[in-house]
Amino acid sequence: MQRATGNIRIFNGLMIDGTGKPPVPDACVLVQDGVITYAGPMQEAPPCEGDWSEIDAAGGSLLPGLVEAHYHPTYFNVAALEDLDTKYPVEYVTLLAAYNMKLALECGYTAARSGGSLFNIDVWMKKAIDNDLIPGPRFASAGREICGVGGLMDWNPDFRKIGMEGLVILINGADEARAAVRTLVKDGCEWIKTYPTGDAAAPDTNDHHTLCMTFDEMHAVVQTAHNHGLKVTGHCRANEGIKNALRAGYDAIEHGTFMD
């Protein structure tokens, strides 16, 4: 990802710096070759010598870039669970993911972390962004997710014989959990996303309080991921699943709906 070149002066805006400090009226932001060199009151800004482009914020708000910390770039027009993995072929999903990456950047997200992606497309999206092939935020990829057999993300019935391989890696037991992580390591993922608990999306089989992975499986995921320098996160609604994640050494928890 290349930096912008040249000098830009943004003025006449209300600056919210994201640190919790009070907003700064009549603020000025100076950017030199893609690096912010000053952000503060207009009257305290250093002089701008040489060639500068200017942007009048016209009284609008100046914000830091946003971080989307749970982003599914391959999700598009999802109305039901089946839309996540069988609605479109992988070729079209790849194009949709590129569109979503561009959209995230245009909405002000300058960084994002994947919460899971079909076919490891996010791994390749990251490479394309880093090599300036497509526009998008700085990105951390997660690839396919890990879930226990019969868990929240295992909804295609066996008689259809289509599996869930594009969306998740299904596991039974700690050994398969380790193997799943090793597969994602080989695929080039940076985060390991798991499904310790269910959700309201499948209330008949895996509601909020259903456990979709055992503690041993979760612990095996963490041990293997940390051995390779990767971080682990989990879709955790139920309190029991949250506690299992903490005991297993998870680096992050997604949702945390019923956390006590």
Image: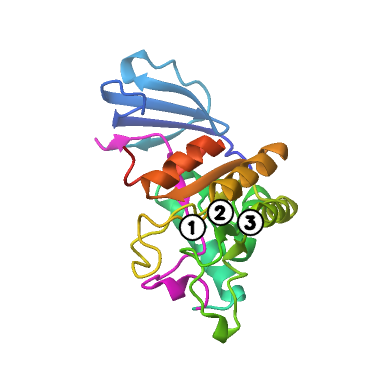
Compared to 21, does 59 lie above or below? below
Which numbered circle lies on residue 129? none
> Which quadrant: the C terminus?
top left
Instruction: Estimate the x, y position of residue 210 in percent, counting from the top left.
Output: 40, 57
- Mark 2 neighbour class, 10 Å CA radius: few under 14, some 14 to 19, many 20 or more: many
**Residue at 59% across, 52% down:** 142
Label 2 belongs to which residue?
135
First of labels 2, 3 by sequence position:
2
Label 3 belongs to which residue?
173
Label 1 belongs to which residue?
212
> Which quadrant: the N terminus?
top right
**Residue at 33% across, 47% down:** 257
Q: Compute the Cα span from label 1 to label 2.
A: 36 Å
**Residue at 56% across, 81% down:** 158
**Which residues are drawn in magenta?**
59-86
Residue 79 painted magenta: yes
First of labels 1, 2 by sequence position:
2
Q: Compute the Cα span from label 3 to label 1.
A: 11 Å
Side of 164 relative to 62 (left or right): right
Taking the image as drawn, is residue 67 in sight?
A: no
Asked if disc 2 and disc 3 are in contact, CB closer than 8 Å, the reply is no
Front residue of 153 and 11: 153
